[in-house]
Image: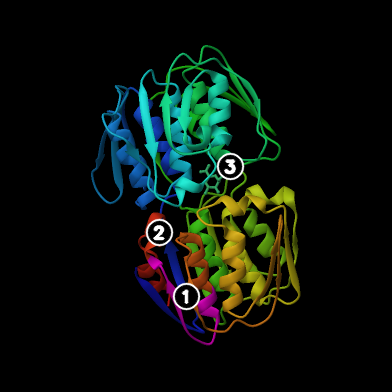
Amino acid sequence: MRSLTVEGPASLRGRIRVPGDKSISHRALLLAALAEGNSTIRGLSRGEDVLHTSAAVASLGALVNHRTDEVTEVTGGLLREATQVIDVGNSGTGIRLLAGMVAALPFLTVLEGDSSLAGRPMGRVVRPLRQMGARIDGREDGEFPPLVVRGGGLHGIEYELPVPSAQVKGAILLAGLGADGPTVVHEPLPTRAHTEEMLARCGVEVSCDDLSVRLVPGPVSPFEMEVPGDPSQGAFWIVAACITPGSDVIVENLYTGPARVGYLDVLTRMGADLEIDRDSGDVRARSSDLRGTVVEPAEIPGLVDEIPALAVAAAVASGETRFAGVGELRVKESDRLEAIRTELGALGARVEAGGESLVVQGGRLRPASVRSHGDHRIAMAAVVAGLAADGVSVIEGWDCVATSYPGFEQDLEELR
Ligand code: S3P
C-alpha cells in the first residue's frame, strides 16, 4: 500500500483543469452503449471507477475505444449477455446504474465489486427494479453484491425514493427505457440531474419538475459530448486555496448544474473569497478567513461528496460548523463520518460524529499520520488538511485515489 507525504503550510497558485465529471462519465458510457451507432465522448474521467464501467459495457457487447487521452468512441446498440461476471471495482455508482440498465436487457448479468462495495446497500435499487419486473438476487436477498440480474419484460412504475439518491433515480430511469410504459420517480429532495440531462441529450422523452422525473420509453440516440470538469474534485483545490495563506487558484470548466455545487454556497457563507463564473464553470479561490456555519439536511444531497473537504474547511474556521442529516455518509466508500472523526481528529481537529450529524470545532491543524480508509475522498481531504498544517503529514493507503483522480499528485505539484 502506498502512502503520500505532504508538507505544510503550503500555498497553491495557478490554473487547473480537473478530470471529467465522474457521475456524467458513467452515464455517458452506459447511454452510448445503449444507443445504436457511434458516440464520441471527450474528457471522460479516466479514474478506475469509470474504467470499470467502460469494461462493463464492453463485456456486454459495446465497442469502446479510448482513442486518445481525451477522446473515447463507443459503438453501441448490439448488447448481449456477458459470458463472465462483471467487476465494477469500488464503484457504487457503477453497480447501481448498471443494475438498472441490465434490468431492461433480456438476459442474465452478474455484477460484483471489491470488498468495500460488498458491504454497501443495494436493496435501494433492487426493490424498485423488482417492482418493475426484474428478477434479481444477491447476498442477503439482494441487499449486498454480488447481484444476479435476469432482465427484460419490465413495466413502468411510479416510485417514491425513500432516500434522496441520484444513483437510485438513475437506475430506475435506465430500467424504464426498456419498460412497457412511462416511469415516474419522485424524490424527497433534489439530487444531481445527470441521468435526466443525458437522457434528454439522447432524444429520450423525459420531463422534470422540482422533485419528479417522468420518462417515456424510447430509443436512445448516439451523441457527441464534452464532459465538464468534476466539481467534486475541484472542491479539494478550492478548499485548499481558501485555507492556506497566499493561495490563489482558478479551477476551470466545472459542471455547475443542479444539486452539484452546493459546497460553493456553504464556503461563501463561511466567508470564502470565491469568484464563480457559472457559464464557463471557472471558480477562483483565494486565501480566506473562514467562520463556522450550519449545513441543513436539505442542502446535503447537493454537496454529499464534498463533506470531507468541507469538514477540513470547518476545522480551520472560527467557531463551530454543524452538518445535519448526514447519515448517508456512513454507507459511502467508507463510513465517512467515522473516517472524518478519527483522521481529522488525528490532525488536531475536535470532531463529533453521532447518528445523523457531524460537528467540527474550528482551530488549528497539526501534522499527523492518517489513514485513507480505502476511500479516495478521505485521502484527498487529508492532503488538503496536511497542506494547512505546519509540518509533514503522511496519508497511508493513498492508492485508492486512483478510483477517481489518478493525476491528483501531478496537479498538486503544478499548483505548489
Ligand atoms: C452519485 C450519486 C451520489 C454520490 C456519488 C455519485 C451519482 O450517491 O455520492 O458519488 O453519480 O449518481 P447517492 O445516489 O448514493 O446519493
Residue that extends furthest to the front in the rendered view of this protein: 140
Q: CA distance from mark 3 to mark 1?
A: 30 Å
Residue 340: name its quadrant. Answer: bottom right
Tell me which numbered mark, 3 or 1, is placed earlier along the sequence. 1
Q: Which residue is mark 3?
A: 192
Q: Residue at x 52, y 11 (%)?
A: 180
Q: Secondary structure at mark 2?
A: loop
Disc 2 residue lies near ligand 1 with CB under 8 A? no
Type of residue at label 3? Arg
Instruction: Please state, as top left, top right, bottom left or bottom right, where the C terminus lies in the image.
Output: bottom left
Type of residue at label 2? Tyr
Q: Which residue is mark 1?
A: 13
Residue 405 position within the rendered picture, expressed as x and y whole percent measured from the top left: 40, 59
Q: Nearest the camera: 53 or 234? A: 53
Q: Residue at x 60, y 81 (%)?
A: 365
Q: Is residue 77 above or below residue 194?
A: above
Type of residue at label 1? Arg
87 drawn magenta: no
Q: Residue at x 37, y 69 (%)?
A: 409
Q: CA distance from mark 2 to mark 3?
A: 20 Å
